[in-house]
Image (tube, coloured by chain):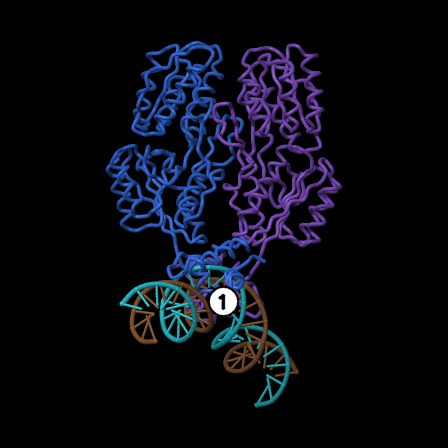
Chain colours: A purple, B blue, C brown, D cyan
DNA sequence: AAATTTCTGATTTACGTACATCAAAAAATC
DNA sequence: GATTTTTTGATGTACGTAAATCAGAAATTT
């Protein structure tokens, strides 16, 4: 049987109340006594029964997820996963809520963080926009003692407690490497479609992609980045224009959202043996992968990310250590052949 | 606040004892009363506080993992993950133990399952060998009411409660598809190195690989399967021999273990632009991927599998539903560029 | 109608921890 | 040595559920 507080009290020859004072850092314990209790704790290998502790505390953990607004399917999938986790999380004494803010808007994000801090939530998970006012808001959350993790897109040099997301430089490198291998010796330049360079994840992916392309045995030109603001309409226009003006185009790497527009532009033109690699598995990209319009999808599992963010925030709130290995978010590579069965994010 | 048993009792106009009888399927409740209580439960949206329930029950869940013996690095990684999970799982009232049995030995596996059943454990996770005596043992576990999941390799037509592992046919298809794309128009046959066709996962991978190769635009011969019994020594001999006798060999797909031998044979020969795809990320395959000896590694994350097996077994033991989407084990594709930082299984 | 069986209620203890109160003991100060 | 302060003990309640006991009510059978 696991040792309990009673066992510690017996072993250390003190009362339950004293053990409690030591365990919960309450005042009124002499140094020698404290040492004796701590020795007993160590000797018995005592670990607090968190379930019982939470029960006794009656504590709940209100966590806030701050996500960008709009019809970005990945973000909506993320939101769905938060709601989904919320349904199952009554059990774990966690209360989840979602706040949406305009995309690419640092000031709005900063306000949302401040609002959460004011509400005195137990933790915040936010898709970061790389802006100074956001950094300041994160610093304020930190001062208030509220754990904050960045989600999907990180924030440089901020005091965030943890980043939940994939290594985006590696993701870009992977895209470049696959693009190079799939194209082989076929000539022609490749195009890159991004959302906005103000998103750190997009910048990092681009960096990795360019590095991998440069490292390939055959030199290949990369056209200037097209910024589609993660909007399907703009993406359609940019890609349609690019397809028309660059007849020998060999490949397209779409590192942001708005892929519905990309797929439509490719369909309109008829597929001319183009190597297409995109990010995030959505209904559109799934269908396009299946019918051969897209060659590979790099994906981050929204469900994993949400669950990881919850675990990390709870651990931070309780002052417990985080298991880095378990919380590392993997980059999934999907090709036609390893596409999982069902719909991915919703269910 | 969440509703409690007391709220149900009030709402239904019955006593706490009756609510308890309904909730825990104890006898001594009239049909009408039971219905009234169930209506109250539904109306209030009551969900049992598992933490409090487990605390009250004082229940622990002894789970057994049955793994093959030997120096198969993937299996040893799996074992390490079980021990690792065991350390962190004191918290969750789970007690994990590992039993090892000779590899490929159905009778030994069956005996181990029977032994676990005799010990009356709360759940069993076993790497299955496809043999009739194993099926019988699984049936006996089922009769005894002990949940059993197959791990990594499934068991056809057995009554196992769940399979924790990747879709191996899809894994084989993915390997074939990547092999085809990476080779492009380069001529030459490909070789397949397996462990044993008595392992269902190996058979399924081969099936998928052959299907994908057949579906490729350029026809390519696949040499007869080499069976290395997951042993590095045999693998070395088989591959060295193959390299010598098939000078125009284009690629190798290793779908089992023993890859240390494969890597050594390739190193001895010097790399002649061969496309090599293997399964399972280990210290050896990681190093070989990094230095270019191997082109891609298909991996199943041992940590995820262990944690999933534990969740599923506990859910089954408690008679709770399993969240299929969360428990789906993904096939990871690793190339040089998305190799995760640290050592993978141990840490 | 009496006897029996089947339900139901009321109450209690327990799980392991948190937290509060009050008294008693020990230590420090004067 | 008396007083104050600090430390410790003893005890109780609470969290939400499980499980047991025993008495009483209701239904069923005789």
Query: Residue at 36% across / 36% down in the picture?
Result: B75
Label 1 Cα neighbours within 10 Å, binned few <14 / some 14-19 / many ≥20: many
Q: Position of residue D13 (x, y in %)?
A: 53, 72
Q: Chain of mark 1?
A: A
In the rendered view, tell whether residue A53 sits above or below residue A284: below
Please state which of residues A241 and A164 is positioned toward the viewer in this rendering.
A241
Query: Residue at 62% across / 17% down in the picture?
Result: A267
In the rendered view, tell whether residue D6 sits above or below residue B79: below
SS label for mark 1: helix
Q: Quadrant of residue B142?
A: top left
Query: Residue at 56% across / 24% down in the picture?
Result: A287
Provide the residue designation for mark 1: A19
Image check: A70 left or right of A9? Answer: right
Q: Quadrant of residue B270?
A: top left
Query: Does residue A48 appear in this view?
Result: no
Q: Position of residue D28 (x, y in %)?
A: 34, 63
Image check: B54 left or right of A268? Answer: left
Q: Position of residue B61 (x, y in %)?
A: 38, 52
């Amino acid at each position: 049987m696991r040792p309990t507080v009673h066992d510690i009290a017996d072993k250390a020859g003190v009362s339950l109340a004293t053990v409690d004072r030591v365990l919960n850092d309450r005042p009124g314990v002499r140094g020698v006594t404290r040492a004796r209790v701590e020795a007993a704790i160590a000797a018995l290998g005592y670990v607090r029964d968190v379930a019982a502790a939470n029960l006794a505390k009656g504590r709940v953990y209100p966590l806030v997820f701050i996500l960008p607004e709009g019809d970005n399917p990945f973000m909506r999938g993320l939101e769905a996963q938060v709601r989904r986790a919320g349904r199952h999380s009554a059990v774990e004494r966690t209360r989840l809520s979602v706040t949406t803010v305009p995309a690419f808007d640092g000031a709005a994000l900063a306000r949302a963080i401040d609002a959460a801090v004011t509400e005195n939530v137990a933790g915040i998970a936010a898709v970061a926009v790389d802006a100074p006012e956001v950094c300041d808001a994160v610093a304020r959350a930190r001062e208030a003692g509220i754990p904050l993790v960045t989600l999907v897109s990180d924030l440089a040099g901020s005091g965030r407690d943890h980043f939940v997301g994939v290594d985006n430089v590696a993701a870009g490198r992977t895209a470049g490497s696959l693009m190079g291998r799939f194209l082989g010796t076929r000539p022609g330049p490749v195009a890159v479609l991004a959302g906005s360079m103000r998103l750190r994840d997009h910048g990092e992916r681009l960096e990795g992609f360019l590095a991998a392309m440069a490292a390939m045995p055959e030199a290949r030109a990369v056209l200037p980045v097209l910024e589609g603001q993660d909007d399907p309409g703009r993406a359609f226009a940019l890609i349609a224009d690019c397809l028309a003006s660059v007849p020998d185009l060999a490949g397209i790497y779409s590192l942001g959202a708005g892929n519905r527009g990309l797929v439509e532009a490719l369909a309109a033109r008829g597929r001319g043996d183009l190597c297409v690699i995109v990010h995030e598995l959505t209904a559109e990209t799934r269908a396009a992968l299946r019918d051969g319009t897209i060659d590979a999808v790099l994906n981050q599992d929204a469900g994993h990310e949400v669950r990881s963010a919850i675990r990390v925030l709870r651990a931070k709130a309780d002052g417990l250590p985080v298991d880095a290995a378990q919380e590392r978010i993997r980059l999934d590579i999907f090709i036609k052949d390893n596409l999982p069965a069902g719909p991915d994010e919703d269910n």
